[in-house]
Image: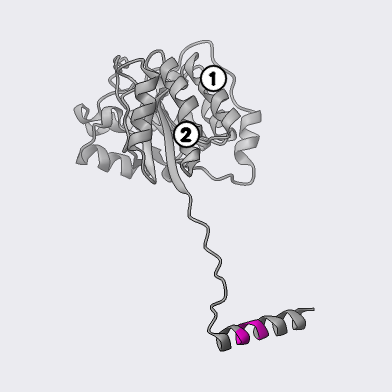
Amino acid sequence: MRKWTAFWGATVAAISATLGVQPPTVAAAPKPKIVYLTFDDGPNAVNSPRLLRLLAREHVPATFFVVGQYLGGNRDYATHLWLSGHAVGNHTWSHADLTHLSADQVRHQLVWTQRLLGQAGGQCMRPPYGAINSGVSAVSRGLGLTPVLWTVDPQDWAHQNALYITSHVLTHVRNRSIVLLHDGGGSRSATIAAVRVIIPQLRSLGYEFRTVPACRVEPLSGSLRKAAKSVDKPRDKPEPTPSGVVVQPTPSPSTG
């Protein structure tokens, strides 16, 4: 059968060449455009579950930059995100402006949060407010954490206008855009409503949703799944503040 296939293929090619006819070409499938949805300032007991249900229903992976002090009573949250197909990044312990802290304080902000994220935490961080300088970058990279900022910011922290959030994202997104949104820091009903529209609209434009590469954690012999089954139960007392960390409550509004 293979010989006949090869024979006829060669015959058709020879006839086409003789007659000056070009054989039909098969157009290569266009490469998909990529977009990264990212959510800051969680976990939040009201917003996060609603958002996660929406993402699960749409089969969309996202990247969550979580605040360490909000993980004290929910130590398995990062593992839960990972098992749901999302990526997890470090958004510091207390949402502090790292450029106003000493190198040691920056290190504490990142190290204590990374410990709570555990094996599910990616090797990435996002500085609150996008505030970063050479000192913050050096400390972050010294800990093996890649700083991740964004390219599209609808400023959903500043207003409750789903139409504006949707319009801003759809008109500014490009291939490999990193979209900044929030699931913490206040009511995010408008954000969730916007995401519900943004997902199908971007898909209709040929976009695929991915997690930020620097924040991904690949499975290692099922270690994370095993850890998820034996994860610590929430403690009665809140997680203590790391020594040497200046704890600042997350301002509202907050960006990044």
Q: Earlier in the sequence, mark 2 or mark 1?
A: 1
Residue 76 visible: no
Secondary structure mostly seen in magenta is: helix
Question: What's the amino acid at mark 1?
Answer: Pro
Q: Residue at x 33, y 29 (%)?
A: 168
- Residue 205 in the image, given as x and y percentages of width and height: 46, 41
Q: Residue at x 49, y 32 (%)?
A: 199
Left or right of 177, for residue 18: right
Q: Is residue 234 visible?
A: yes
Q: Is residue 108 above or below residue 234?
A: below
Q: Quadrant of the N terminus?
A: bottom right
Q: Nearer the viewer, residue 157 or 85?
A: 157
What residue did someone put label 2 on? Answer: 201
Image quarter of residue 41? top left
Q: Residue furthest front?
A: 19
Circles 2, 1 touching at the beta carbon (< 8 Å) = no
State the image coordinates of residue 61 (x, y, percent, origin top left).
Answer: 52, 36
Residue matched to label 1: 49
Region rendered in magenta:
11-15
| Residue 15 image position (x, y, % from top left) | 62, 86
Write the residue at 21% across / 39% down. Answer: 135
Element marked by disc 1: helix
Disc 2 is placed on an element classified as helix
Inspect the magenta stretch and tell me whether residue 192 lies in it.
no
CA gap, disc 2 to disc 1? 23 Å
Query: Which amino acid lies under the numbered mark 2 shown in the image of this protein?
Result: Gln
The part of the image, by quadrant, that contains residue 10 is: bottom right
